[in-house]
Image (cartoon, helix red, strand yellow):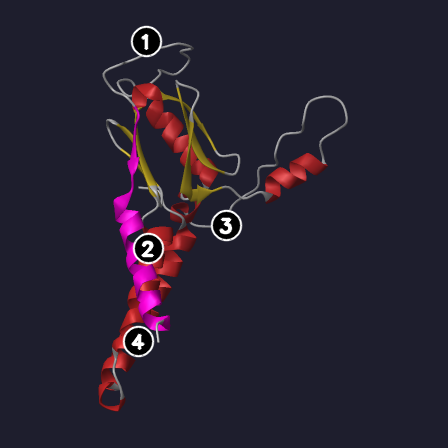
Amino acid sequence: MYRSPWAVAVAAGWAVVGLLVVGDALLRESSGSPLPGLLVVVAVSGVVWSLFVRPCVEAGAAGVVVRNVVRDVVIPWPRVLYVDAPLTLTLHDDDDRAWRSWAISASSRPRRHAAAARPAFGPAPELPVRADPLPAPARELRADAVVRELTDLQRTPGHGRASGATEQPRDDGAPVVASVAWAGLLPLLVSAACVVALVRP
């Protein structure tokens, strides 16, 4: 499962703050109703869950699942044409559709530097390769690393297109399935209801 490390940090930070708010609301029950504090916790928790925790990319034996806020997409390996990350992690299927993930974003700084160094004529220079001081788990969550891993899985025999192959017969028995992500939308609706309850006189 691939998820932004920033999303994990935000979720962990809010978990600590939320517990403190709940504890404070319950301890102050004698001086007033704890309901406003609890509604704030529920409202923010719904937003954090839908926008930061739930979006992810899952790679399994059958294919890739892209979980976003409002839509989930299941892409079987035979349907995956290639994977890249121009701005966010994007999976391209054999129907020329691009499925983007909110969970994995690519840093635009190396791309801006490459664009600034691009000559008026001739091929663009290669992006510089530098030593990365981050530990392996942090490097693996970067968009380029995720692209490499998914590409390796997609080229694994029995998954998708074999390495070096240019064409592969289409498997009509395994379609790409896109569905509404109710697990992401319902918490947002609950959060909106909590906000309405808080501002209602």
Q: Nearer the viewer, mark 1 or mark 4?
A: 4
In the image, residue 9 sits, relative to residue 159, either above or below, namely below
Q: What residue does disc 1 label?
A: 169
- What x and y, as percent, mark residue 88? 47, 39
Q: Are marks 1 and 2 in contact (CB under 8 Å)?
A: no
Between marks 2 and 4, how big is the CA–CA gap? 18 Å
- Of pointers 2 and 4, the one earlier in the residue sequence: 4
Q: Amino acid at mark 2?
A: Leu
Q: Is residue 197 magenta?
A: yes
Q: Nearer the viewer, mark 1 or mark 2?
A: 2
Magenta range is 176-199
Helix, strand or loop under label 4: helix
- Of pointers 3 and 1, the one earlier in the residue sequence: 3
- Of pointers 1 and 4, the one earlier in the residue sequence: 4
Helix, strand or loop under label 3: loop
Q: What residue does disc 3 label?
A: 133
Helix, strand or loop under label 2: helix
Could you say which disc has been placed on residue 188 in the image? 2
- Residue in view at x 31 percent, y 65 percent: 194
Q: Which image quadrant: the C terminus?
A: bottom left
- Of pointers 3 and 4, the one earlier in the residue sequence: 4
Between marks 3 and 4, how big is the CA–CA gap? 42 Å
In the foreground, 33 or 92: 33
- Residue in view at x 39 percent, y 59 percent: 9
Q: Which image quadrant: the N terminus?
A: top left
Could you say which disc has been placed on residue 181 in the image? none
- Of pointers 1 and 2, the one earlier in the residue sequence: 1
Q: Amino acid at mark 3?
A: Pro
Tell me if 103 is positioned left or right of 74 in this view: right
- Residue in view at x 31 percent, y 19 percent: 78
